[in-house]
Amino acid sequence: MKEKNIDCPCGGGKYAQCCGRYHNGSEVAPSAAALLRSRYSAYVMDLGDYLQATWHRSTRPPEPISTEAGLKWLGLEVRQHESAGDSATVEFVARYKIGGRAERLHEISRFLHEREPGAGGAVALVLRRRQFSK
């Protein structure tokens, strides 16, 4: 399967021009909304290393991140995106199916711009905190 020709799981176009460029490290997501979309796509594609790398070190889970068996992601809706200085918030709803039952994850995520040690001082957005909504 050619990456260029597959649709991006986040719904933003072709994978190679959308989240693929962030996943392969050729570019850094330029906004919190783009990072959120790339993280959703990483969950769909089971890219645990990317999820770990884009999670703030103070809240990053120590165990590897992997997709739960039987879980199928169905779609992403970004509802709101706000930036203020070095931080941003994104509200979204991700739909998924597990055990034959459709579910939705409604979340407000906070992202920070952070200088990565050992990365030549490059600034990257990282997930800092998650707040779940009903």
Image (cartoon, helix red, strand yellow):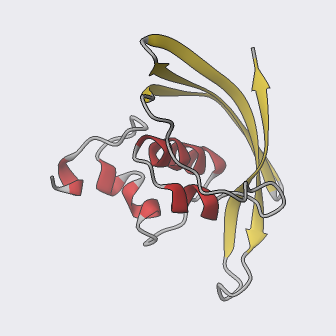
Between 18 and 43, the residue placed more toward the observer is 43
| Left or right: 91 in relation to 85 | left
| Left or right: 47 in relation to 103 | left
Residue drawn at (39%, 46%) of the image? 45
Residue drawn at (44%, 48%) of the image? 46
Between 68 and 56, the residue placed more toward the observer is 68
Give the quadrant of the C terminus.
Answer: top right
Residue 12 drawn at (x, y percent)? 39, 39
Corner quadrant of residue 121: bottom right
Total tally of numbered discs in the picture: 0
Between 23 and 124, the residue placed more toward the observer is 23
Corner quadrant of residue 114: bottom right
Residue 106 drawn at (x, y percent)? 67, 22
Note whether 28 is above or below 3 in the view shown.
below
Residue drawn at (58%, 55%) of the image? 51
| Left or right: 28 in relation to 112 | left
Note whether 53 is above or below 44 in the view shown.
below
Between 40 and 13, the residue placed more toward the observer is 40
Q: Residue furthest left?
A: 1
Residue 39 drawn at (x, y percent)? 54, 48
Residue drawn at (48%, 23%) of the image? 96
Corner quadrant of residue 60: bottom right
Residue 67 drawn at (x, y percent)? 49, 41
